[in-house]
Amino acid sequence: MVWAVIRKTPAERAGATLKDYDAEASRFSWAAARAELAGLPGGGLNIAHEALDRQVAQGRGGQVALRWIGRDDAIREFTYAELTAEANRFANLLRGLGVAKGERVYGLLGRTPELYFAALGALKAGCVFTPLFSAFGPEPIRARMEIGEANVLVTAEALYDRKVAPWRGELPSLRHVLLTDCKAAPPPGVTALEPALAEMPTAFETAATRPEDMALLHFTSGTTGRPKGAIHVHEAVVAHHITGRTALDLRPGDIYWCTADPGWVTGTSYGIISPLTNGVTLVVDEAEFDAERWRRILREQQVAVWYTAPTAIRMLMKAWSQDPRPYEAPALRFMASVGEPLNPEAVVWGVEAFGRPFHDNWWQTETGGIMIANFAAMDIKPGSMGRPLPGVTAGIVERGADGSVREIEAPMGMGELALRPGWPSIMRGYLHEEERYRKCFAGGWYLTGDLAMRDSDGYFWFVGRADDVIKSSGHLIGPFEVESVLMEHAAVAEAAVIGLPDPVAGETVKAFVALKIGLEPSEDLRRELLGHARKRLGAAIAPKDIAFRQNLPKTRSGKIMRRLLKARELGLPEGDLSTLESEER
Ligand code: ATP
Ligand code: MG
């Protein structure tokens, strides 16, 4: 199937924040982007100051900044002025405890308001903030806190008791633990957060951070192996701010829902920082995914811009196959997706279910912000990640054995996706892994580790992670292409494809498939899927074998762990599983 281009209407183009891609890209400068922000006196820059104080100073103090929906549907709202006050209280608490600028504050919380106070307050105090998934077990928490030499941990009592208290004494850098929801008097060495915050003044002079001061330490998703700690600085806010407007179409006053957990980079860059610097009202749902609940939030909260992920979209599609009621989301204007390749099937399903397509965009923990995107004013080629952001130069390159790097100019030539360093949110290092960091750069490029192609219109097409690409009888096969074809079949909810060693072909393609609700695996269905793939892809690329699975193994940020499927298939060690989500769901 060749997917038809989804054309944007003249009205859609005229209404978008980025109306004319070519014109905007040619006149873009990061210096001009920086000039939109306030900065601190004396040339300083602070992410939280731009997200909060700048908005209040510009008269946005009375607008709701954060609308939090509790698991039980209770709603708590904080205006820009109130959120600033809460962040200030948190910053004052850190100061009162003697926590200095540059010290590391970790957040291990569900999606609660306190997490937002802590992230923003820590940044205001000039500390480095690191979010962790609250669903991590004790080991991944401990490993990340040891690597980052955590000084302060903000968490909930229940999480602390189970996951941190047993080993806390073995982490000497950890001086303070701040606990939310303390039922009784906190144990020694621990501060109950809410009462302590209540006593703090609501004014705070933001620490005099410099643009190059470390602000965030983000661990990667661990999809390909042991997670890396990517260092980001305050200057990243320039990219967070501009890319929110250009790639997510954010406008002041919009109601915006980012479904990513702040435990990974999307939930911070686009779940906290970018929406606030862009003056939107942020909707945060404490509860886990639930198709019916999400349908309700989109409608009741009047969400205008929605940023989600392929895994969630595929789960919604799964639910839809049982119950295909169109979504009532009258305020919805723009839907975007990130984190994994978005199958063309899912892009087009958006049109069917919401009356508008999903806009895929691409970036990584290391890039700190969106790098390649389908923009609101741009026609969508389903299956493509779109075009580089204004200010970002992307290329397809080939690394030679001698370490040289050559750009592949020919349209649809496959190679490694590379970016020219120079955008403000590029990582400044992998913590304690200097050599690994250095290896990401060659020939004036930052090398992403992903394979892609660029077509003659300048659209980029994801092929697969370099580690996941399959070499079979002289063909290079990207798992995404094969998975997308399997997804076209009405019975398939999710698919993952790996290469298995083969004495003749080098590797053969094996697929793992999860079926839609209510369907049972059968030999007939297996044969039908193999036939469908062969017809669409040809015998050289189609899977030789298909196995059915109830669920596919994923990271907590929702990425399919192909390496784990492969290790299990080959009986090899499973490697670092610290980010593996429970496979029950
Ligand atoms: P690790 O580096 O530890 O293996 P990870 O790469 O999954 O983990 P992240 O930085 O969270 O950690 O994810 C970035 C990666 O996710 C990208 O390099 C790419 O492989 C994938 N990705 C993100 N967005 C897209 C997209 N729109 N299309 C295809 N792949 C995407
Ligand atoms: Mg990665």
Image: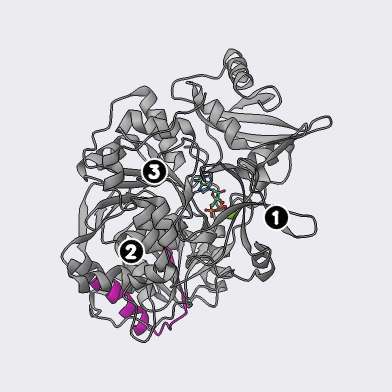
Q: Earlier in the sequence, mark 1 or mark 3?
A: 3
Q: Secondary structure at mark 2?
A: helix
Residue that carries the numbered disc 2 in the rendered image: 116
* Residue type, label 2: Tyr
- Label 1 residue near ligand 1, CB within 8 Å: no
Question: Does residue 6 lie above or below 539 as drawn?
Answer: below
**Residue 118's spot in the image, x, y percent?**
35, 68
Residue that carries the numbered disc 3 in the rendered image: 378
Q: Secondary structure at mark 3?
A: loop
* Residue type, label 3: Met
**Residue 443's spot in the image, x, y percent?**
68, 63
**Residue 480's spot in the image, x, y percent?**
58, 36
Residue that carries the numbered disc 1 in the rendered image: 406
| Mark closer to the observer (1, 2) | 1
Q: Secondary structure at mark 1?
A: strand
Q: Residue at x 23, y 80 (%)?
A: 201
Q: Is residue 46 left or right of residue 144?
A: left
